[in-house]
């Protein structure tokens, strides 16, 4: 990279499990790989940060636990850390993921260091679809969005919802989630597969944080119906508040011997490559990153027609969609696909193609880079303007 094009970028995200943290961390890693200097400013090390990279720096936000504070003020510590790192490292911009509290903190940091600092805010979903419904927070979210220099959202559906719920008029850029094709591809997992299922059995998978919004009980309902028609197994990956309810439901249905609870896992691509089908019956999903990760591994998804999911999954092409809670239709569609080899093969190919050409790391990371140069009023390097021939 030409040194004049090198950007100094601060990233703040939720560093623990969750799609927004994954997107923020993977983006930071890609930017660093291209030669930009990336500073993560978070309360703990982002879980996907991985190996050492000379262009990546991590600054931990330490919360002041002064005895008069009833609630230690994380937000103030974050804003103050952001301002400190911006000054110390000469950052050009802060890219924050989630309006609350991260964008609000970044705006405070901007006031502390000066107008030259640009704030890019990415909306991921629940900051709008859940928090913006709360009247005690909606004005603050509107303030965060209107005060940011650039706002992006991960689906058109989320943009529309942001406009409707908050009456936002400023432009919101659409930048979809992405997958790194060097990590997410169909792995050779022949031996491992034998440990989970017999050769005649299909494997279904659900990955989430088991929040109520994921409707994990529907996953059991769907699997119950499928397993009566197609010999199959179900893998649950992740942990969260609804996990114990799922266990009870699986027990009640007599399915425990067919269900494996894998807990939190790092190498998701490996597990996805074992699977034949992903189940994602969420109530809300601004994009559905796990379905994209599955797609990149050649695994179609049966999902609800919620939020931004239809922008990712084309019904009948890269998966099937049904109304939220319609477990009967979802099961029928899954059974049809699992019993129809030709249709399955065509869908698998379509998944691989779409993940590789529409939602791949090269395409989306370039869009973010272009946006950064634009907000900074700097000319983008020529290679950014040329569309990649192949992802
Ligand atoms: O889905 C979750 O519970 C996690 C959540 C998050 O905040 O990390 O994910 C949101 O952001 C992801 C990355 O942009 C999206 O792919 C998910 O669809 C979105 N989740 C919801 O909208 C419920």
Image (cartoon, grey):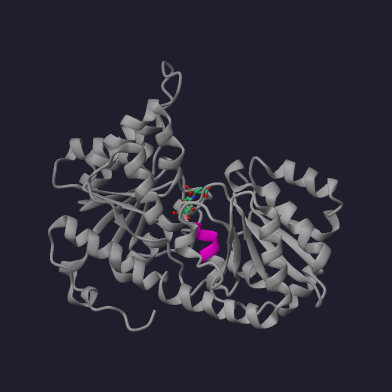
For the image, the number of numbered tags is 0
Name the residue: 80% across, 70% down: 197
> Is residue 67 depicted above or below 16 in this figure?
above
Which image quadrant: the N terminus?
A: bottom left
- Of the pair 119 and 35, the residue shown nearer to us: 119
- Of the pair 137 and 230, the residue shown nearer to us: 230
Residue 46 is left or right of residue 185, and the answer is: left
Which image quadrant: the C terminus?
A: bottom left
User: Is residue 104 in view from this perspective?
Assistant: no
Q: Position of residue 225 (x, y in %)?
A: 78, 58
> Is residue 5 depicted above or below 162 in this figure?
below
Residue 257 is left or right of residue 107, and the answer is: right
Q: Position of residue 252 (x, y in %)?
A: 84, 45
Residue 112 is left or right of residue 328, and the answer is: left
Q: Position of residue 315 (x, y in %)?
A: 54, 67
> Is residue 248 depicted above or below 300 in this figure?
above
Q: Quadrant of residue 54?
A: bottom left
Residue 93 is left or right of residue 166, and the answer is: left
What main secondary structure does the magenta stretch of the protein show? helix
Q: Quadrant of residue 268?
A: bottom right
User: Is residue 283 in view from this perspective?
Assistant: yes
Q: Which residues are magenta?
A: 288-292
Name the residue: 64% across, 77% down: 344
> Is 204 inside the magenta-drawn segment?
no
Outermost top residue? 68
Name the residue: 55% across, 62% down: 291
Name the residue: 41% across, 76% down: 357
């Amino acid at each position: 990279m030409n040194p004049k094009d090198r950007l100094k970028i601060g990233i703040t995200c939720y560093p623990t499990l969750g799609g927004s943290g994954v997107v923020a961390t993977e983006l930071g890693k890609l930017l660093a790989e291209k030669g930009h200097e990336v500073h993560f400013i978070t309360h703990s090390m982002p879980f996907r940060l991985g190996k050492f990279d000379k262009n990546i720096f991590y600054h931990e936000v330490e919360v002041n636990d002064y005895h008069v504070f009833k609630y230690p003020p994380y937000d103030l510590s974050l804003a103050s850390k952001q301002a400190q790192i911006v000054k110390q490292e000469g950052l050009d911009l802060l890219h924050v993921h989630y309006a609350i509290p991260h964008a609000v903190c970044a705006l405070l940091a901007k006031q502390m260091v000066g107008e030259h600092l640009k704030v890019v805010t990415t909306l991921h979903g629940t900051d709008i679809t859940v928090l913006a419904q709360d009247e005690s927070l909606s004005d603050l979210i509107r303030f965060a969005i209107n005060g940011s220099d650039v706002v992006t959202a991960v689906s058109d559906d989320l943009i529309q919802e942001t406009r409707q719920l908050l009456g936002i008029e400023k432009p919101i850029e659409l930048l979809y989630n992405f997958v790194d094709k060097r990590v997410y591809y169909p792995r050779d997992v022949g031996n491992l597969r034998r440990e989970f299922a017999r050769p005649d059995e299909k494997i279904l998978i659900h990955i989430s944080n088991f929040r109520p919004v994921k409707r994990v009980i529907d996953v059991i309902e769907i699997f119950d119906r499928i397993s009566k028609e197609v010999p199959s197994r179900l893998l649950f990956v992740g942990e969260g508040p609804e996990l114990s309810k799922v266990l009870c439901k699986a027990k009640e249905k007599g399915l425990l011997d067919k269900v494996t609870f894998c807990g939190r896992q790092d190498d998701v691509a490996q597990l996805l490559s074992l699977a034949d089908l992903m189940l994602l019956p969420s109530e809300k999903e601004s994009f559905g990153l796990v379905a994209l990760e599955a797609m990149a591994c050649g695994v179609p998804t049966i999902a609800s027609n919620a939020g931004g999911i239809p922008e990712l999954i084309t019904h009948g092409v890269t998966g099937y969609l049904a109304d939220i809670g319609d477990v009967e239709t979802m099961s029928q569609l899954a059974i049809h696909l699992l019993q129809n080899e030709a249709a399955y093969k065509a869908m698998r190919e379509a998944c691989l193609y779409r993940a590789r050409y529409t939602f791949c790391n090269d395409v989306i990371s370039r869009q973010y880079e272009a946006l950064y140069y634009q907000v900074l009023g700097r000319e983008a390097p020529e290679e950014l303007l040329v569309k990649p021939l192949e992802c």
